[in-house]
Amino acid sequence: MTTTDYAQLKAARELLTRIPLPLDVEADETPGTPYTVTHDGTAEHGTATARTLLAAMARQLDDYILPRSASVDNPLTIVVGGSTGAGKSTLVNTLLGEPLTQSGAIRPTTRHPVLLHRAEDEAALSPERFLPTLPRTRTSGMNAGSQALPGLNPKIARALIPITTSALPQGIALIDAPDIDSVSEENRTLAKELLSAADLWLFVTTANRYADAVPWELLHEAAARSIAIAVVLNRVPEGDEEAIENDLRRMLDEAGIHAVLIHTVTEQPRDESGMLAPVSLAPLTLWIRELGADAPARAAIARQTLAGAVETLAGNLQVLAAEQARQQAAHQSLATIVAEEYEDALTTIDGALSDGSLLRGEVLSRWHDFVGTGDFFRSLDSTIGRLRDRVGSALRGQPAAAQKVEDALESGIHAVVLDAAARASENTRTRWRASRAGRSLLARLDAPQATSAVPEQNAEAKGEVQSAEDIFSAAVAEQIRLWQGSVLEMIREEGADKRKRARFLSLGVNATAVMLMVAAFSLTGGITGIEAGIAGGSGVVGTKLLESVFGEDAVRRMATRARTDLLERMADLLTEHAQPFTAVLEETDPQADAEDIHRAAEQVHAIAAEMSAQSQTTQSQAAAHTNGTVAR
């Protein structure tokens, strides 16, 4: 493998860290949908299966593909796997000539995998170079027949137990794995992880269980990634060897599995150490020794299995690309819903500021109290200058009236904003509930741990508990007051000219600001003619008075500026109100683009094709080497 190929595999591993699959998207039956086959033959689709696949891919890259790619000459790893009670540990102990791993009638027997290897291979099988995700633990006091044998102690956490032995040839490592159909889910998971990290799977089964569904699921998976498989048919009644072995061969052929070795062991008693007669495993023992002495043959098996694992990785990346495309589509759809609903809320607020609806009811009543409706309106026929003087004289005597208009405006705007924000939130939730992805985000959003800490901090400052709605309401009120203050400041800035200053001081700064606030809702909204309420009557009076002070262009500019400033403030408030939705969307960003995953799959597929070609060449060389050895 070239340095570039290895770098691409490393890049694929890094890419997996950017595929969190955070959304529970709708399962479908389209090609490329992640699925697994259950024991009854049905398919399971959906994001949960894709997450399981993603985790398995990451583990296999860490435990097998990357370490093996870095050094194909490392010891060949043979994982001994099979069903509960198949006699795996007894088989291993017999092969080694001494009881080094726990066997017995208690189920599950092997709770922890045991790694057996020669001392010379210890460095090559260190955690840095082999199964780095599985911690190592060592045991002491291992005596034949004692309960101290490794693999049984329930107090030992999930770990790999390494043991050196001279019974194995150099270049061969043997792992006694937990049962693939163990009652313990942790054992089953660990067994599958170990099989995914194997160069060769030594499958142990019995005459009664060789057709069980669970091991055949794993056999099919092993065949799909071209892993080398050897089979030991154990506990076969004497006289039935040929019939049962032939049936097993038939099943393997039908499944497209070409075993490198099939060995049958008849039913027989064990000795005082719990081992079988060594002669019963002589062909298997000889095969392992020959494999240990044949470096080209080991390399051929390792390359074959590695090429198959990388090809499977490429296919799985394509599956993840399809799932990621669904994640991105679902995420974008949910984000669009939030944007649409809160944009509609701002449009609603804008409409309320434009259509004169704010300038009715309480605001209209307070405005009439402010400017009067009798002699004041009849004075419209008089000159604006005289009118301004009369109004200014009247208003300076009732500053509280201006404040009442301000309060009424604040109350009206406040109610409009709260209603619009509440509708946006509720509509967003309603639309999110229509999809599985949306429901999963709402569950995350409403979980106790998802509650923002900001309300609690504010509550502590005020000595009371406040809801998010109370906090938002207070924020809206504050921004409206700040806006009113900015209008007042605008009036001061515009009236800095000495001539204008004298005119607007004759009305009063607060009164002028109130008139400008009203003008912002009537003048800039396109309201024309005689319209009910302020917009068609006394609002015109205020506008005319302002124009007499600042000029028509300046009044329109200030009114537009005031209204724009208010809308910007309300837009910021709506952004804040939408923050729980946008925050959970940010937390669940799919990250990697589906196209990037698709391209990575194509690159990995090309690597697999190249490795497969190299594997075939290595196998030819290994066969030639074996034939030459036999000839000599």
Image (cartoon, helix red, strand yellow):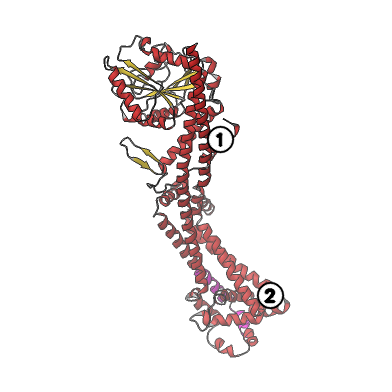
Quadrant of res 91: top left
Q: For the stretch drawn in magenta, what is the main secondary structure? A: helix
> Distance from label 1 to label 2 (Cα)?
68 Å
Residue type at mark 1: give it. Lys
Q: Nearer the viewer, residue 232 or 51?
A: 232
Residue 141, position in %: x, y?
A: 45, 13
**Residue identified by numbered label 2:** 495
Q: Counting other residues with Cα less than 10 Å from the Cα at mark 2, is it few (<14), some (14-19), or many (20 or more)?
A: some
Residue placed at 35% from the left, 19% from the top? 87
Q: Nearer the viewer, residue 196 or 576?
A: 196
Residue type at mark 2: give it. Gly
Residue 132, position in %: x, y?
A: 52, 28
Residue 491, position in %: x, y?
A: 65, 73
Q: Nearer the viewer, residue 123 or 211?
A: 211
Task: Classify residue 240 as left or right of residue 352.
Answer: left
154 vs 378: above or below: above
**Residue identified by numbered label 1:** 10
Q: Indicate whether residue 393 is drawn in magenta.
A: yes
Residue 331 seen in this snapshot? yes
130 vs 369: above or below: above
Residue 487, position in %: x, y?
A: 61, 70
What quarter of the picture does the N terminus occupy?
top right
Q: Secondary structure at mark 2?
A: loop
Task: Classify residue 203 as left or right of residue 329.
Answer: left
Q: Nearer the viewer, residue 488 or 551?
A: 551
